[in-house]
Each structure stands twice: as structure tokens, then as C-alpha cells.
Image (cartoon, coloured by chain):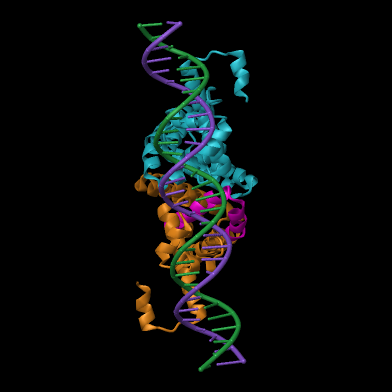
Chain colours: A cyan, B orange, C green, D purple
Amino acid sequence: MLASISLVTRPRLTQQERTERTRELLLDATIDCLVELGYARTSTNEICRRAGVSRGAQQHHFATKAELMASAVEHLVSKIIDRMTSGAREALTGPDRISQGIDMLWRGYSGSLSTAVMELWVAGRTDPELHTAMQPIDKALARRTAELFREMLGEQVAGDRPDLPLWLTVNLIRGLALDSMIGGDPARRRQLLDEWKTIAVKTYGS
Amino acid sequence: MLASISLVTRPRLTQQERTERTRELLLDATIDCLVELGYARTSTNEICRRAGVSRGAQQHHFATKAELMASAVEHLVSKIIDRMTSGAREALTGPDRISQGIDMLWRGYSGSLSTAVMELWVAGRTDPELHTAMQPIDKALARRTAELFREMLGEQVAGDRPDLPLWLTVNLIRGLALDSMIGGDPARRRQLLDEWKTIAVKTYGS
DNA sequence: TGAAAAACATTCAGGGCTGCCGGTAACTTC
DNA sequence: GAAGTTACCGGCAGCCCTGAATGTTTTTCA
């Protein structure tokens, strides 16, 4: 129904444009479903309904559900990286580089995108096909995250092992993200993150 | 098949004994399924198969699947509490009380039991019935965990806010548990936990 | 011991989901 | 502009899962 609007303004679409558009619609709908319904209740039917696309079209672009999910992971990770890099580009000075680095990780590893990723990881634990599809993408995210973190800290900060504060923070945030899924208190999470920031600055600050 | 053995040694069983036995079999099988198959692929059929019990018996004790899952949560949490308390009873001295407290939390919040809990929590996020069933049980676990942690530390340690180190640790461990589900490196997790122990002792130690 | 109740077994119907298939419309290429 | 390719549509079959309903065995209690 909404499609007709863009079709009116631009009746002719390149095949490539159509493909890109439909795939994007499907992948975004998939993420929506993961966030709102969870992996178990996410059906290709519902995805198509939300994307405003027929089941036939879905199957044309992603032959199987697993294929669709695998592509959704890539889509998701690129969105997460965008979100971490956005607003992380100003030159940083002073001892609160670490604090800002933690904020960056918070942007990337919490929120609805992270919820979707968690659904997929949990599902992938017992789904070999999904698991093997996710593994390299996860590695890429980890590598990019480490790069961004090092950039923010600058080489001279945090001594010889910037990885420890990085992964301590990431794992803590993942735990907190899980807590938010359970329905914990947001104020408490904020408090815990602040406490960790203080500790991290004291421990790893220049 | 195996049931016949116990039936031979003790052909007569009290109704209460039969009930208890069957429920235990079902709940343990449920946890097994959650760990090995994940929530999405856990069917009542498979649970019955593993428990060696007919579907009728399952339905007699747990009318609906949701009811079974809710009971599984209780079963699970009581197992986790047992595991934390076991070996945590010796009198503790010295500054590594905190370190031992962290070990206790590690016992409780990682491993296969924790995996099962995580499956349920993630599923419960988008399943209102399961969610409301889990909420109070989770609260009880949190309360008991806090009690145990305070006992181990002793009142004089950690100042006025023992909750901060406690929940920082729990959330970190949950993040690490998630990492293990993804397939991260166990040695790295151990390293991160050790680093956290050092920091915690330094920060919160007496 | 015999009736009532509890525990257990088996089969059935309804529903949703996935993957497949034949057909149609839109774009591309020559 | 006509053939060929790509994108898209709607319906169908098979599968599994859940909950219900009915029948059978075991224990309990009077």
C-alpha cells in the first residue's frame, strides 16, 4: 500500500533498485520481529506481512529461513557499527576518554539492536547452521569494536593491554542488556554502569 | 525400560512418590531440552521422550506447556541456589573473601544451569505468561544471592554498599555466560574474571 | 475386598509454519 | 519491439506441535 506511493513518484525502478529495496524491507522486518516477537515466534509469514511483501518474493531473495536470518545478522551488525561510530569522531582529550569509550560500547551493545542480536545468538547456540553463519560476522564486529575502542583511547592510554578494559566492559554491558530483557530497573543499570566507569577510569586511566 | 528396574526392587510406590518421581523426571528432562535444544526446539513431545513418560502423564501433572516451563524455572532456581551454597560454608578470613564471593557467583550464574535460565529469560521477554511466572522466582533468586554474598563478605567489609560489587559481578558473569554460548574462548573468560577479581579486591577490599 | 480417586497411556483433531510449484508482471538486452 | 531474464504472486502439501478426550492401570480408603 505504501509501495504504491513510491511507485507513483517513480514508476520505473531498476532491477537492482527493486532487489535492494525488497531485501532491505525484509531484513528490517526481520529485525522488528526478533525484537517484538523473539526468535521462536518469528515466522517468515509475519516477516512478509510486516515488510509488505509476498511470501514468493521473500523466497526469491532468501531461499530459506536460515538464509534470511544469516543476512539479518549482517544487516544488524552493520547497523550496530554505524551506531557506535556515529558521534564518536570528535577529538578526545583528558582522562575521560575511557568514560567516552564505555559510552560508545553502551551505544553498540545495548538497546533494541542488541536485543535482536541476543535473540539470534541464543537461537544460534543450538542451531548449527545459524551458528556457523554468525561466527565470522561476530568476529568482524569484535575486531571493529576493538579498533574503535583503541582509536578513542589513543595508543598511549591504558598501557599494554587495552583489551582487558574493553572486553570487561562489553561483557558487563551484555549482562546489563540481559537484565533489561528480564525487566530489571533501568536506574539501577545506569548506576552500575556509572560505578564501572569510575572504577575503569581509576584503574586504566592515564 | 529403566523404570522396570526400580519397579522390580520396589513394586509398590505411594501416589505421592509416583507424583514426585514423575514430576522430577519431567522437570529434569525439560532442563536438558533447554540446554541441548534451546527453547524454540523444546517440545512437550521431546520432553516426554527423554523423561520416559507418556504425554498423558505429562499433561496430568502439567496441564499446559507454560505451566511446565514455569515449574521448570522454580526447579532450576532451587538447583542454582544449592550449587551456590555448596562449598560456601567454611569460615572465611582475609582479604580474599571478595574473591571467594565472586567464585560463588560464578558457580551460580554460569554453566549449564545458567544456560537453561537464559533460554527461559530470553523466551520470557516476548512471552507475557512465562514472563509473569518468572518474575517472582527471579526476585527470590536475587534476594537469596544477595543474602549469601553478604554472609560471605561479612558486615564489616565493602562499606555501606555491598550491592554494587555484587551486581557488577553478576552482570559481568552473565555477559561471560553469553559469550560462552556464542563460542568465545574459555581461557579469555577466565582471564577476564581474574582481572575483575583483582580490581574488585582492590576497590572493595577491607 | 470393592469402590473411588489418582496416575498413566493412546489416539485424534485443529492450527501454524515451511518449502515448493506453476503462473504473472516488470525490467533488460539485443 | 521481441525474446529472455529477473522479480513477484498465491495456493498447496507435508510436517510437527499442542491440547483434548477417552480408556486403562495402580493406589487408597472405607
Question: Residue B126 in magenta?
Answer: yes
Would residue A48 appear left or right of A166 to someone viewing this image? right
Left or right of residue C10, residue B157 in this image:
right
Q: Is residue A75 visible?
A: yes
Task: From the viewer's perspective, tell me whether residue A6 is left or right of residue A172.
Answer: right
x and y percent of residue B34 in the render? 45, 55
Residue drawn at point x = 38 percent, y = 49 percent: B190
Q: Is residue A170 above or below residue A3?
A: below
Looking at this view, is B143 or C4 the one in front?
C4
Q: Position of residue B76 (x, y in %)?
A: 50, 62
Residue B54 in picture, x, y percent from top left: 45, 67
Q: Residue at x 40, y 32 (%)?
A: A140
Q: Position of residue A109 (x, y in %)?
A: 51, 38
Residue B132 shown in magenta:
yes
Residue B129, quarter of picture: bottom right
Front position in the image: A50 or B150: A50
Q: Is residue A104 above or below residue D23?
A: above
- Tell me: residue A120, above or below residue A2: below
**Predominant SS along the magenta part:** helix
Q: How many marks?
A: 0
Q: Which residues are magenta?
A: B112-138
Q: Is residue A114 among what the camera can see?
A: no
Which residue is located at x 60 percent, y 18 percent?
Answer: A6
Q: Nearer the viewer, residue C16 or B13?
A: C16
Residue drawn at the location 54% of the way across and 25% of the way down: A86
Q: Classify A177 as above or below A101.
A: below
Of B179 and A169, nearer the camera is B179
Q: In the picture, which quadrant includes the N terminus of chain A?
A: top right
